[in-house]
Image (cartoon, rainbow, N blue to C red):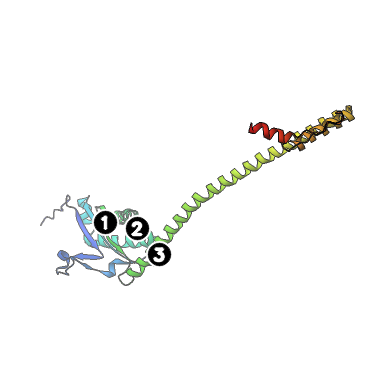
Amino acid sequence: TVETPKVTKVNRIDIGFRSERDSGFSSGGGVADVPQESLMLTGDENIVNIDFSVFWVIKDAGKFLFKIQDPEGTVKAAAETAMREVIAKSKIQPILTEGRSVIEIETQEIIQSILDDYESGIQITQVQSQKVDPPDQVINAFRDVQAARADMERSKNEAEAYANDVIPRARGEAAKILQAAEAYKKQVVAKAEGEASRFISIYNEYAKAKEVTQERMYLETMEKVLAGIEKVIIEKNVGSGVVPYLPLPELNKKGSSN
């Protein structure tokens, strides 16, 4: 008989689980777990449960027919080896979250390299992870750890946001205080310089005419002191029989009432 390989068919191999169609029995959930294939050790010494599928086609019918005896078994063994190699150098956090696509690509490249070394005539088209979880025995504890990490990250972000808000405002207040202090300093210095200039000016006038300056300063001082208070004026050079007293306050009051 002549065996004609189906070069256009996309073949699939499942690792870590079997579908009801492949296993030949119904488990109620559609798949049956295969722990000896799915449990793998991570680079940070955690155990992860990975179910994934490998899709492949025949790219060279001659090599496919004559270079390998068990194509599906060869692809399955290469895929499991490649995935364990990638998981062994990865940490569990990216494996379970954002690192899945990277792991799929790296695994596909390693599988293809192995099959090319065998001259298998097989082309890997895709590696697709179906389920990536911690083992069932510790999944609840792992989720608690993940929730705690999320809370810690949220608290860290809130603290950074608070610091980003408070620190600039504190710097602004400090700058405002420094500006006010500098303005007050300039005001005090200017006032002191003005007082000194005024004192020097008065002293120069005093040095030129001491008596005149003393009298002027006396009159200016008395003008400031007596401003706003009641005054009584007594004229000493009035004639006899005239009362030398002029009651200005009383006269002002009478004038106001009239």
Secondary element at image label 2: loop
Secondary element at image label 3: helix
Q: Image quadrant of residue 180? A: top right
Q: Answer above or below: position of 138 versus 126.
A: below
Q: Position of residue 191 (x, y in %)?
A: 72, 36
Secondary element at image label 1: strand
The residue pinned by badge 2 equals 97
Q: Left or right: 3 with respect to 156?
A: left
Sooner in the amino-acid sequence: mark 1 or mark 3: 1
Sooner in the amino-acid sequence: mark 2 or mark 3: 2
Residue located 33% across and 69% down the image: 140
Q: Image quadrant of residue 250? A: top right
Q: Left or right: 13 with respect to 1?
A: right
Q: How dense is the environment of label 1, judged by Cα within 10 Å: few (below 14), some, or many (20 and up)? A: some
Please identify, in this view, whether the residue under mark 1 or under mark 2 is nearer the observer.
Answer: 2
Q: Left or right: 228 with respect to 23?
A: right
Q: Give the alpha-carbon distance from disc 1 to disc 3, as whole Å.
A: 30 Å
Q: Answer above or below: position of 134 versus 54.
A: below
For the residue pair 244 and 217, the one nearer the viewer reads as 244
Q: Position of residue 81 (x, y in %)?
A: 32, 62
Q: Give the alpha-carbon distance from disc 2 to disc 3, as whole Å.
A: 16 Å
The residue pinned by badge 1 equals 128
Q: Quadrant of the C terminus?
A: top right
Please identify, in this view, whether the residue under mark 1 or under mark 3 is nearer the observer.
Answer: 3
Q: Image quadrant of residue 13? A: bottom left
Q: How dense is the environment of label 2, judged by Cα within 10 Å: few (below 14), some, or many (20 and up)? A: few
Q: Give the alpha-carbon distance from disc 1 to disc 2, as whole Å.
A: 15 Å
Say which amino acid is labelled 2.
Answer: Thr
Q: How dense is the environment of label 3, judged by Cα within 10 Å: few (below 14), some, or many (20 and up)? A: few
Sooner in the amino-acid sequence: mark 1 or mark 2: 2
The residue pinned by badge 3 equals 148
Residue located 31% across and 64% down the image: 133
